Amino acid sequence: MSKTQQNNREAFAGEAKAFVRLKAFAAQAEKEEYTQIAKLFRAIAEAELVHATRHLRNMKLVSNTEDNLKYAFESETKVNENVYPQFIKEAVEEGDQASAIAFTHARDVEEIHASLYKKALDHMVNEKDTRYFVCKVCGYVADGELPEQCPICGAKKEMFMEVE
């Protein structure tokens, strides 16, 4: 891998992390009623997303939709099977229950995400529209109908948001 390719990877990771971090900062500022600061955090987060997207494209990771679905499926499967089990084991060994629960939820949801990518290919072929609902507690994604409660973390349906 060339130095520039390596730099694009590092830049992408940094910008993607900044985007997520700033969105969390904005939510906290809103909670504390610092509306203007929240707006600034969201604006800069969007700028970081622009940067991250450019780096991702420079890495040639954005392809046609079918290939993107396959890549996304493989990524979710890899994380679910190889990364989170180790994270869970280490959190349990260190007695960090909150992290162990978060890692377990993420692992379980990643498996569902992978199945949604496969299902999306069918939707694409059959030209089927569907609705998606995301649990704001654990990240579970429901396809089609809003569940009464999250099958992963048990959150009530009020904790879901519909994605447009």
Image (cartoon, grey):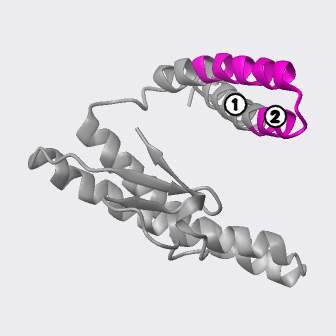
Residue drawn 55% across the image and 75% down it:
152
To which quarter of the image does residue 50 belong?
top right
Crowding near the residue tagged with mark 1, few <14, some 14–19, many ≥20 C-alpha atoms within 10 Å: many
Above or below residue 17? Residue 157 is below
The image shows a total of numbered marks equal to 2
The boundaries of the magenta stretch are 24-50
Residue 34 in the magenta stretch? The answer is yes
Residue drawn 60% across the image and 59% down it:
159
Q: Nearer the viewer, mark 1 or mark 2?
A: 2
- For residue 19, the mark is 1
Residue drawn 30% across the image and 59% down it:
144
Helix, strand or loop at mark 1: helix
Residue drawn 45% across the image and 48% down it:
162
Q: x%, y% of residue 40?
A: 79, 17
For the stretch drawn in magenta, what is the main secondary structure?
Answer: helix
Of labels 1 and 2, earlier in sequence is 1
Question: In this orientation, which residue lies closer to the viewer: 128 or 118?
Answer: 128
Q: x%, y% of residue 131?
A: 33, 50
Left or right: residue 8 versus residue 150 is right
Question: In this orientation, which residue lies closer to the viewer: 101 or 81?
Answer: 101
Helix, strand or loop at mark 2: helix
Residue 30 in the magenta stretch? The answer is yes
- For residue 30, the mark is 2
Asked if labels 2 and 1 touch by Cβ distance under 8 angstroms, the answer is no
Quadrant of the image for the C terminus? top left
Above or below residue 69? Residue 82 is below
